[in-house]
Amino acid sequence: MSQYVADLNRSQYFSLIALATVMPESLPSFRFRQQPLTKFDIGLLDFLSLQQCDVGVIAGRKNSILGKVMTDSQRFLYELDIIRAIESCDLKESELSATLRSVAQQKRRELPKAFGNALFNGKESEAFFSLSNGFVPLNYSTAEQQELLDALGRLVVIGEQLSNLPKVESVIFEGDLKILMDSEYAGRLLYSLMQLTEYLKSVSGVIAHQGDEVCGAPIVFLKQQFERHYVQQIQPYMGRINQSAYQVLPLLTRLVSLSSPHTEPLDRFLGQLDFESDKSVWQEYQRASQQHAGYWSALFERCALPLTAAG
């Protein structure tokens, strides 16, 4: 994009200063993403009473040394297990039974939060949403894309089945989070969209104010740069970005919805990649792309140049 602007600037009718890198809002720190979950503490006598079903064993796992430092992804799996165990436990002691039912109901209400913590609080999300890895690479492969889509699809299925307490295999769940981490896709996409949007809007701003004096030799030169850089290089790259984003972003937007509510800082960050919101970076990029093409087309038409050559 910088070479596109540099070559356009060779015309006396086009002047655009070098653009600074514009960064999107970054993923909030852990303490601004974490959603607190209700603790489930049982006394010794209650613990002994619960040995007749799985509740005591599972609760004991959480209260162990390793359980106290379990990751958010493992905490989510624990929440599913403990709710399932409580609801299947038949106790004769009515007071303890009522307490457990209340705990299960509260934990059911918190399941989307636990799911959101698993998705957005770990090292996997920090890599997936990192803005430090630059643009989506030109050689981003179909195989990598399909692996990411499959992982996101499986996570969406889990989110849609939360009320049914889905049986989630830890190895597959953790593996899907690792696929997200290794892809670095969301952060790369967000960074790419922001840079492309800034360049497209800046070029559009200059093209929109061109007068009739640009027609003739000047517009021929500008059109050559448009074709050389935008039509032949930038537009194909944007096409690849669009193709992948149109598949990934609806799934990501769905995951955000299924795991809400989030903290306000996390909600604001995730909103940048919202597939549907008019205020998202994705939608702003779409508008900038359409506007850029529209201004060039209008200028070529005004100067009686063939529109087909504009791509």
Image (spheres, helix red, strand yellow):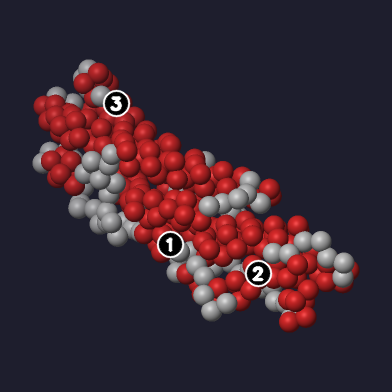
The image shows residue 57 at horizontal and vertical percentages of 65, 69
**Circle 1 residue:** 27
Residue shown at 75% from the left, 76% from the top: 48
Given residues 217 and 108, the one toward you in this image is: 108
Which image quadrant is residue 144 in? top left
Q: Quadrant of residue 75?
A: bottom right
Q: First in sequence: mark 2 or mark 3?
A: 2
Q: CA distance from mark 1 to mark 3?
A: 38 Å
Residue 297 - label:
3
Return the residue nearer the eye: 304 or 86: 86
The Cα–Cα distance between marks 2 and 1, rounded to whole angstroms, is 36 Å
**For the point 33% across and 58% down, which residue is it?**
131
Q: Position of residue 148 (x, y in %)?
A: 40, 44
Instruction: Look at mark 2 in the image and give the residue it sits on.
Output: 57
Q: Position of residue 92 (x, y in %)?
A: 87, 67
Dot 1: element: loop
Q: Earlier in the sequence, mark 1 or mark 3?
A: 1
The residue at the point 45 percent across, 64 percent down is 122
Note whether residue 73 is visible: yes
Q: Quick one: SS at disc 3? A: helix
Q: Residues within 10 Å of mark 1 (few under 14, many from 20)?
A: many
